[in-house]
Amino acid sequence: MSTRGHPFESGSYTGQARAFFEANPGVELTPHELSSRLGLTKLQAYTVIRNLKAQGVCESVRVVRLKRAAA
């Protein structure tokens, strides 16, 4: 099975991720978990997420906040 290719192809990384989310609609994964599940690098995982968002398949949320000092 090809792991690269056009993002709409079922054998591509994006296609594999899309199939996973369609088979598991209630599952939420961090980019790290997605990369581990599909054997991707961090950069590849973010590319897959970007492709899925462009296809209207998923959404992603990032939160950046100030670290609080220990009281």
Image (tube, grey):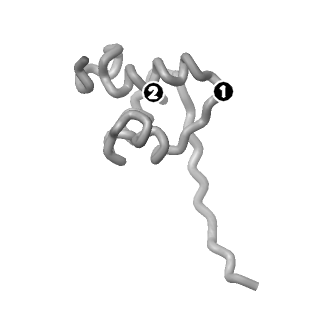
Q: Mark 2 points at which residue?
A: 52
Task: Give the residue type that dot 1 points to.
Answer: Gly
Q: Name the residue under label 1.
A: 26
Q: Residues within 10 Å of mark 2 (few under 14, many from 20)?
A: many
Residue 45: give x, y in percent of width and height: 38, 40
How many callouts does the rendering have? 2
User: Residue at point 45% right, 27% down?
Assistant: 52
| Nearest the eye: 5 or 1 | 1
Q: How crowded is mark 1: few (under 14 residues within 10 Å), some or many (20 or more)?
A: few
List the single residue furthest toward the right.
71
Direction from residue 2 to residue 50 in the image, left or right:
right
Relative to 29, is 6 above or below?
A: above
User: Residue at point 30% right, 22% down?
Assistant: 12
**Which mark is in front, 2 or 1?**
1
Residue 34: give x, y in percent of width and height: 46, 38
Task: Give the residue type that dot 2 points to.
Answer: Leu
| Nearest the eye: 50 or 9 | 9
| Nearest the eye: 54 or 4 | 4
Relative to 35, is 5 above or below?
A: above
